[in-house]
Amino acid sequence: MYSEKVMDHFTHPRNVGEIENPDGVGEVGNTVCGDVMKIFLRIKDDRIEDIKFKTFGCGAAIATSSMVTELVIGKTLQEAKEISNKTVAEALGGLPCQKMHCSNLAADALHAAIDDYHKKQKVSG
């Protein structure tokens, strides 16, 4: 049912945790399945210097959270904004149709964290 990459990111998730005093935070959830993802960003020179996540959800939700952090570390904010649910699912070798909503959450949480960072910059700048 799941690819080897999905199982690897589920059983050995990367970048789990929180960043103290993050530059941006994004939290999204799906009321249908109960999955909730929170992503923390540290930005330096318009690049994602560090990224962590906390996810409450199924194996696919954990795997997509882990994969999205791997995809964007070191990327510019613009490059990270281009990450889509499809990008995350493809990077994991695909997801079953009934689990595709989990990859939507990972990209959405990332985008929400970037938006939060931009809002904070406008307030402080």
Image (tube, grey):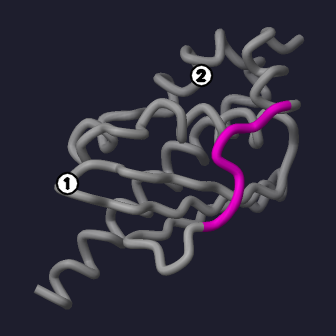
Q: In the drawing, does residue 26 fall left or right of residue 124?
A: right
Q: Which residue is mark 1?
A: 46
The residue located at (82%, 57%) in the rendering is: 56
Task: Determine which quarter of the picture holds residue 89.
Answer: top right
Q: Which residue is mark 2?
A: 89
Amino acid bearing label 2? Ala
Is 96 situated above or below 77? Answer: above
Q: Nearer the viewer, mark 2 or mark 1?
A: 1
Location of residue 36 in the rendering, given as x and y in whole percent from the top left corner: 73, 60
Location of residue 109 in the rendering, given as x and y in whole percent from the top left corner: 53, 55
Q: Quadrant of the C terminus?
A: bottom left
> Which residue is most to the bottom?
123
Question: Label 1: how many residues lie within 10 Å, few (<14), some (14-19) or many (20+)?
Answer: few
Return the residue nearer the eye: 82 or 43. 43
Is 88 situated above or below 104? Answer: above
Q: Quadrant of the N terminus?
A: top right
The residue located at (55%, 15%) in the rendering is: 90
Location of residue 105 in the rendering, given as x and y in whole percent from the top left corner: 60, 47
Location of residue 99 in the rendering, given as x and y in whole percent from the top left corner: 76, 30
Amino acid bearing label 1? Asp
The residue located at (55%, 76%) in the rendering is: 20
Disc 2/disc 1 C-alpha distance (Å): 26 Å
Q: Is residue 85 magenta?
A: no
The magenta stretch spans which residues? 12-18
Question: Label 2: how many residues lie within 10 Å, few (<14), some (14-19) or many (20+)?
Answer: many
Magenta segment, prevailing SS (helix, strand or loop): loop
